[in-house]
Amino acid sequence: MADKKASNRNLTKAKNTKNDEFYTQYFDIEREINSYLEYDPNIFRDKTILLPCDDPEWSNFTKFFAQNFERFGLKKLISTSFAPDSKTYKDGYQPTLFETNDPQFDEKKTVTNGKTFTLTHDKSGDNKIDFNDLEWTYLKGDGDFKSEEIKKLRDEADIIITNPPFSLFRDFLTWIFEAEKQFVIIGSMNAITYKEVFPLIKDDKLWLGNGFKAGNAFFSSPMNNDYADGVFNPDTGLVKFRNVVWYTNIDHGRRHQPLPLMTMADNIKFSRHKEIKGKEYQKYENYDAIEVSYTDAIPSDYKGVMGVPISFLDKYSPEQFEVIGMAEDNGKGFSGGIWDGQNPHCVINGQNKFKRIFIKHRQV
Ligand SMILES: C[S@@+](CC[C@H](N)C(=O)[O-])C[C@H]1O[C@@H](n2cnc3c(N)ncnc32)[C@H](O)[C@@H]1O
């Protein structure tokens, strides 16, 4: 529990200090992407995939898609990086040998420009298309995803996949939706409640992906040492976050598995939560809904609206539930058309404190 709190605190810290340098593990990418392939083996066939905000020379995203280029039947893979000089974290930049040994190497551009790596065909002549066939060049600009240069690549792509900078998550998502692309991206679970994000969830235009194993996301970061014990593990060299999820608009199987639930009566009899067992489900004072503080305590037979924690979305199946709205815990605003902005939010016993998502069973 202390570990969980520390992990959450550290993601906030990353936001405050604008540490956007978190590098995703190969295993996590593989696990996530496999869940889309299991659902539709042809999901990537003949598609152009763009991996923006990457560092293609050593990014696991670039490695993973390049190594699986043929298996996935890709048409084109494009990966772009952000110029070292434009990054918030600049310490200790060294161009790779791969770059310095290349005739294109440019001492100035290596720090001021981004790079683009492209894969379409077998360049090396070894009869397979893989990482060794990537062709690279410096970008004209710094590789900012908002630049016209990268927007052009976005428009060319069918699917955008990356771990975007946490500090620019809202802008990044808007950038994807502007171009109506398919996507698989990593972000903080807190982004669920952003006003740019929640309406998309409610309308089933964006949902959570399959997710990190046991909810633990491990990243490498040059700021590793700034993280607390238990978050940074010196043995693995990785930092661990508990509240990081994948966001996507590509379908996967887990999304269609209904949550197994008990009736309200059985919950009250058998629930493992002391707040539920032997008690009544409480109603909010200012909204006709019941408070369900644990996803596994959602009663299977309740016909009305229920307020659940935001982590419910990790278990959300659109065939089982309808998402109706959301209440903030800060008394400031509302989403989903329920609160009028004047009312307090989710009040029980005079206390206004819950950040909740409102849901209803599709059929009871
Ligand atoms: C969270 S890291 C992820 C890196 C890589 N995709 C991975 O997961 O291993 C985000 C990267 O985006 C870069 N970045 C920050 N602002 C950017 C921008 N405006 N445009 C493009 N990239 C940016 C950061 O420097 C960082 O390298």
Image (spheres, rainbow, N blue to C red):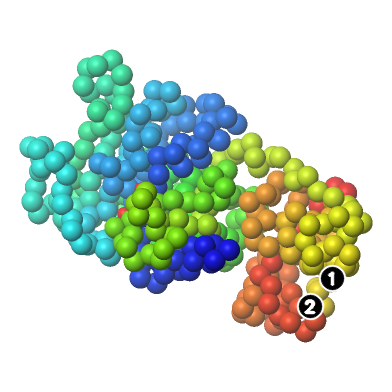
Label 1 residue SS: loop
Q: Residue at horizontal 50%, vertical 59%? A: 188
Residue 235, image x, y percentages: 36, 50
Label 2 SS: strand
On the rendered image, what quadrant is the N terminus found in?
A: bottom right
How packed mark 2 is, by other alpha carbons closer than 10 Å (few <14, some 14-19, many 20 or more), is some
Q: Earlier in the sequence, mark 1 or mark 2?
A: 1
- Picture quarter with ligand 1: bottom left
Q: What residue appears at the point 31 percent right and 26 percent down from the top-left corner?
A: 130
Identity of the residue furthest to the right in this view: 265
Q: Are marks 1 and 2 in contact (CB under 8 Å)?
A: yes
Is residue 318 visible to the viewer in this orientation of the structure?
A: yes
- The residue that appears at 44% across and 39% down in the rendered structure is 27
Question: Residue 351 vs residue 251: left or right?
Answer: right
Q: Which label number is shown at residue 329?
A: none
| Label 1, residues with CA under 10 Å away: few <14, some 14-19, many ≥20 | few
- Identified by mark 1, the residue type is Gln
Instruction: Compute the Cα span from label 1 to label 2.
Output: 8 Å
- Please, what is the three-letter code of the amino acid marked with disc 2? Ile
Q: Is residue 290 left or right of residue 139?
A: right
Query: Horizontal placement of 104 versus 351: left or right?
Result: left
Q: What residue sits right under mark 1 in the picture?
A: 282
| Residue situated furthest top in the rendering | 127
Residue at (39, 47) in percent of width and height: 24
Q: Please state the horizontal and vertical placement of residue 296, each as a whole percent of the image.
A: 75, 54
Rendered view: 118 above or below 309: above
Q: Return the x and y of residue 193 as percentages of the image width and height.
A: 59, 65
- Residue for badge 2: 348
Residue 261 percent location from the top left of the image? 81, 48
Is the C-beta of the residue carrying label 2 under 8 Å from the nearest atom of ligand 1? no
Figure check: 292 above or below 52:
below
Quarter of the image where one finds residue 277? bottom right
